[in-house]
Structures are given as C-alpha cells and as structure tokens.
Amino acid sequence: MVAGVGERIAAGDDPTAILADVQRGMEIVGKRFEDGEYYLSELLYAADIFKQVNEPLAEKLASRETEKLATMVLGTVKNDIHEFGKDIVATILRSNGVEVVDLGMDVDYEAFVAAVREHHPQFVGMSCLLTTVFDDMKNTIAALEDAGLRDGLQIYIGGGPVDESLVEYVGADLYCRTAQDAVVAIKRHLGVN
Ligand code: B12
C-alpha cells in the first residue's frame, strides 16, 4: 500500500483522492476489526501503514499555494488516543488555506486553553472516537469558557460516535461528519467561496 501510494503521487494523481481511498481502507479495517475478522495486531499494522502514507500526502497537499483563510486549533480530546480522523482533518484543512495548530491526541483541557491563548484562532476542532470521553470534550469547552476565551470562537466537533445531538451537550457550535464538511462550514462562516 505504501508503495502504491508513492506510485500514485509520482503519477500525478490528486492527493485528496488518494487520501479518500486511504480513508476508505481504514474504514474497511475498522469494520473487519469490529466483526472479529481482524485482531488488534492487524489494527496496529494498519495504523502504522496509515501513518506512513499520510505523511507524503500531507506534504503534497500542504505545498499547494493557497491564501490563508483562518487558524484552527485542533486536537483529539483528553483520554482518547485515536488520531487518524484528526490527522485527515488537519491535512484537508491545510490544503484549503486553514492554518492548523495540531495539538495531537489525549490533549489536556489546559493545553487547548493555552493554545487558544497563544494562537488566537477563529476555530477550534475537537475529535473523539470513544463514547467515554464526551465529558472530556464538554470539560475542555468549559475550561475555554472559564478562561474567558469562548466568545468569538467557533468550536467544531467530529469523530466516529459524535453526532448533532452532542453539540448542545458539550457546548460546541457545529458537528462535522467529515473533514470536507469543516472546510465548507469554515468558508461559509467567513463568507468566502
Ligand atoms: C484505528 C483504531 C484504533 C487505533 C488508533 C490508532 C491511531 N493512532 O489513531 C488503536 C489500535 C490505537 C485503537 C485503540 C483503542 N480503541 Co480503537 N478503533 C480504531 C478503529 C478501528 C478505526 C478508527 C479510525 O481511525 N477511523 C478512520 C478515521 C479516518 O475516521 P474518523 O476518526 O471517524 O474521522 C473522520 C470523521 O469522523 C471526521 N472527524 C473526526 N474527528 C473530527 C474532528 C473535527 C473537528 C472534524 C471537523 C471532523 C472530524 O473526519 C475524519 C475524516 O473524514 C475504530 C473502529 C471504527 N470503525 O471507527 C476503533 C474504535 C474507535 N476503538 C475503540 C476502542 C474501545 C479502543 C480502545 C479503548 C481499545 C482498548 N480496549 O484498549 C483503545 C483506545 C484507548 C484510548 N484511551 O484512546 C472502539 C470505541 C467504542 C466506543 N463506543 O467508545 C471502536 C469503535 C472499535 C469498537 N467497535 O470497539 N483504536
């Protein structure tokens, strides 16, 4: 797969299309894991492959000339180490002119607060894949509020178990099913095409 992606990049294939295929691959792996067809070792192997192919794709997409539209502080919330979805969001946003401050995964509430204080983003993106961390998402947003940083911030949330109904519970502004949804929402919010 790593070699296949390299060949497609060299052949001039659209990196966004390649990334979409990689994502579909990860979804298949996830399904097989859930169905008991794959074990954790296979999941970790797939995780390693994903990391290897995401890097050159992210580089390729980042090198596109785009006007800077906005800044987003992005991270997977505390107690959750899933990062592929978040990585894809970072890659897609960057290739669409959004500067992304990627805090990684298992991000402490205070690390979000510190990053918003330092980078003054218009947007904050939070990802989670575990239903057990919904309260961590809520607490992160509460920490931003307590720090007096919530006003004027658009907070977008996403990840496998997240849906519209969580927006109100955690105090966010918008649920995005995909990275592309976030691009559309950001542009709409900023009034650009
Ligand atoms: C890969 C994986 C792992 C890898 C993660 C590797 C990594 N570095 O990310 C490893 C093996 C480490 C792992 C560990 C665990 N996992 Co896991 N994992 C998965 C798996 C198979 C795929 C997730 C994934 O990468 N999907 C692909 C990405 C691209 O999709 P995505 O994240 O949804 O992101 C897209 C959108 O949602 C959206 N999006 C996501 N975030 C955001 C944020 C914003 C702002 C926006 C705009 C959009 C957006 O954009 C993305 C691109 O379009 C899922 C099963 C599944 N079907 O989801 C289980 C799954 C999420 N894991 C699960 C579990 C339980 C765990 C563990 C607790 C297992 C354990 N017992 O130790 C640990 C987690 C420990 C912890 N504290 O976090 C459960 C969660 C169950 C639940 N209801 O909470 C799942 C659902 C599997 C299952 N059915 O049991 N896991």
Image (tube, rainbow, N blue to C red):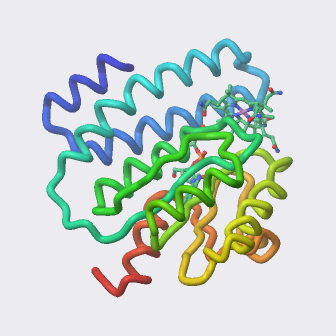
If the picture is divided into quarters, which one holds ligand 1? top right
Q: Please name the residue shown 57% across and 66% down the image.
A: 176
Quarter-wise, where is residue 93 in the image? Answer: bottom left
Quarter-wise, where is residue 165 in the image? Answer: bottom right
Residue situated furthest top in the rendering: 41
Query: Is 170 left or right of 20, judged from the image as shown?
Result: right
Residue 51: x %, y % from top left: 46, 27
Query: Is 5 left or right of 82, judged from the image as shown?
Result: left
- Residue toward you, 90 or 7: 90
- Residue toward you, 42 or 106: 106
Quadrant in which the C terminus is drawn: bottom left
Quadrant in which the N terminus is drawn: top left
Residue 178: x %, y % from top left: 52, 58
Residue 59: x %, y % from top left: 26, 38
| Image height of 22 relative to 14, above or below | above
Query: Is 81 left or right of 6, judged from the image as shown?
Result: right
Q: Please name the residue shown 62% across and 50% down the image.
A: 111
- Residue toward you, 5 or 54: 54
Q: Please name the residue shown 53% across and 56% down the image.
A: 115
| Image height of 122 relative to 139, above or below | below
| Image height of 80 relative to 109, above or below | above
Q: Please name the residue shown 68% across and 40% down the image.
A: 106
Residue 144: x %, y % from top left: 68, 68
| Image height of 104 relative to 112, above or below | above
Residue situated furthest bottom in the rendering: 191
- Number of numbered discs: 0
